[in-house]
Image: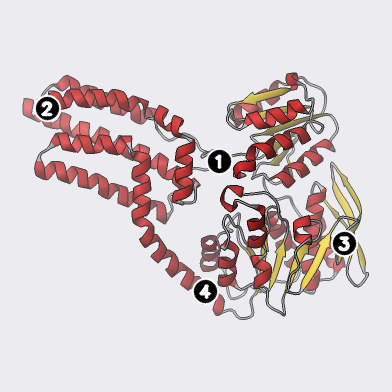
Amino acid sequence: MPEIIETVATVLLFAAFAADCMMLSLYYTHMLQLNSYRNERYGRWLRENGSMIVSQMGWLLLAMIAVACYLIQPSDWKSRTACILLFLIHIYLNRPKKAKKPLVYTARVRRLIFTLSVFLIAVFAAVYFTGMLRIGLGMLFLWASLSPLVVLLANTINIPVERMISHGYVKDARRILESMPGLTVIGITGSYGKTSTKNFLHSLLSVKYNVLMTPESYNTTMGVVRTVRERLRPTHQVFIVEMGAKNPGDIREICDLVRPKYGMITSIGEQHLETFKTLDNIIKTKFELADAIPPDGIVFLNLDNRYIRDIRVTSPAVTYGINPDVKADYKAGDISVGEGGSSFTVTAPDGESQAFTTKLLGPHNIQNIVGCIAAAHKLGIPLSELAVAVRRLKPVEHRLQLLPNGYIDDSYNSNPEGFRAALDVLAGFEGQRVLVTPGMVELGERQDALNTELGGYAASRCDYAVLVGVKQAPPLKKGLLDAGFSPKRLFVAENLAKAIEIVNSLPDEGKRTVLLENDLPDNF
C-alpha cells in the first residue's frame, strides 16, 4: 500500500510540475505571438520586462526549496506534498488572465505547442526508461525557470518548417493571382491612415466594381497570402491590398507577390523607429510601392505630407491634398469640420468640382477621402456618384469613431501625426474634454521625446488628462506639466479599467467628451 501511495504521489508531482511548465510556456507563446514570432523582438521584450518575469517566477523559489527537500529525502511524503501544493499555487497565480488580444491558437501556435510537448515527453521518457526521478525533476525545474528561453528555443527549432510552409502558401497565392490576369490590384501604404483609406476606397469603388480588400489589418506578406487563398474569387475585379512594414524591403516583398497596377502612399512619419532606426529608411520603404507601379499604372501621392512632397517618382503620379498652399491634382476646399462631421469641395484636374459631406471627424479623414476620390475617379467613377458614396461612409472601428456615450474611440494605434489630429478633433468639442492615453510606443530612441512633445501639445486641447500605465506615463506627464497643465487635472492609472474609473469620478461639468487615444497590447 505505501508503494502505491508513493507511486501516485510521484505521478501527481510530475503532473503538477508539467502543468506548471506548460502554463508558463503558453504565456510566453502568447508574448511571442504578439511580437510577430520574431526572435529579435521577443528577445527585446524579455530584456525590457526582466523584473516582471523575475516576479512572476517568485513562487518557483519556494518550489525549488521543496524540490531540494524531496531530492534529499525522496521517501518523505511531506516534501513531495509540499512540491505539489507549491506548483498548484504557481499554476493558479500564473493562470491565463483576460487579455486585450488573447492568444490565437493558429496552426503555427499549435506546431509550437507540439514542439514544446515533445520536450515534455522527452523528460518523461528519460525518467521512465532510466528511473532517475531526480534528473527528471531537475529538467522540469530548469524548464520552468527558463520557460521564456524554452519558448524561444522551440520557435527557433520550428523556423525551417515555418519557412517551408510559408513558401508553399506564397506559391499557391501567386498561382491564384496569375490565374486572374484581368484583376486590378491597388496597393495602399503609409505610416498611418492606410487602413481607413483602404476601407474608404473599398466603399467608393464598390459603386462600380466587385471589390475585395485585405481584411482588418492583414497587411503583412502572409496576411495578404491568406486573403488571396481564402477570399479572392474569379468574380472579383479589384483587389485592394494594405501594405504594412516594419523593416526595409517589406513593401517590396508584398509588391513582388501581388504586382499592383495602382498604388497610394497616404503618409510618412516617425513610426516603428524601433525597427526602421531612421526616418530615411521609412521613406525609402514606403516608396518601394511607387517603384513597383508599371508605366501604365498610377501612384497616388498625398502632397500635404512634406516627406512625400519632397520625393520625385519615375512612375506616373497623381497628387491630392487639402492644404491650400499645395498645388495638388485633386484638391479639397471650402472645408468645414464640426462635431457632426465634415463638408468640403473637391476639384479634379480638368476643373470639375463636386461638393461632399461625411459624418467622419477631422481634417485628416477628409485628406484620406480625397485620395480615395482621386483613385476612384481615375478608375472611371463620376464625381457625382462618388458624392453619394462618401456621404454613406462609416468610421472604421477604433479610428476616431464617435460613440453614443460621448467617447471618441481612436484606440487602434497611435503615431505623432495621428495623435495631433485626434487632439485637434477633441479640441473642437464643447464642454469637458478628457484625454485618456498610454502614449505611443515602437518609436525607438525618439519615443520619450515624442511623447513629451505630444504631452505639451495636449495641454491646450483637453481639460483633464488620464495617463494609462506607470511605465509609459512619465514623458507625457512631463510634457503636460511643462506646458502649464494643472497637476490637479492630471491622473496616472495602472490600466485602462482604472482610467475609466477616474473618468467616471470627474466632476460633472456638463457635456463630456472623452478621447481614447491608443490602447497598447499586452506585451507593453
Q: Which mark is residue 5?
A: 2
The amino acid sitting under disc 2 is Ile
Horizontal and vertical percent for residue 437? Answer: 67, 34
* Cα distance in 3D space between marks 4 and 3: 37 Å
Can you tell which of label 3 and label 2 is closer to the viewer? 3
Q: Is 109 left, or right, of 221 in this rendering?
A: left
- Visible in this render: residue 444? yes
Q: Of marks 3 and 2, which one's residue comes earlier in the chain?
A: 2
Residue under pointer 3: 331
According to the picture, the residue beneath numbered tag 1 turns out to be 521
What is the total number of numbered labels drawn onto the structure image?
4
Cα gap from disc 1 to disc 4, whole angstroms: 33 Å
Spot occupied by residue 375 in the image (x, y as percentages of width and height)? 77, 68
What's the CA distance linking mark 1 and mark 3? 37 Å
Q: Earlier in the sequence, mark 2 or mark 1?
A: 2
Residue type for callout 3: Lys
Question: Horizontally, is 148 left or right of 362 in the view?
Answer: left
Foreground residue, 457 or 254? 457
Q: Residues within 10 Å of mark 3 (few under 14, many from 20)?
A: many
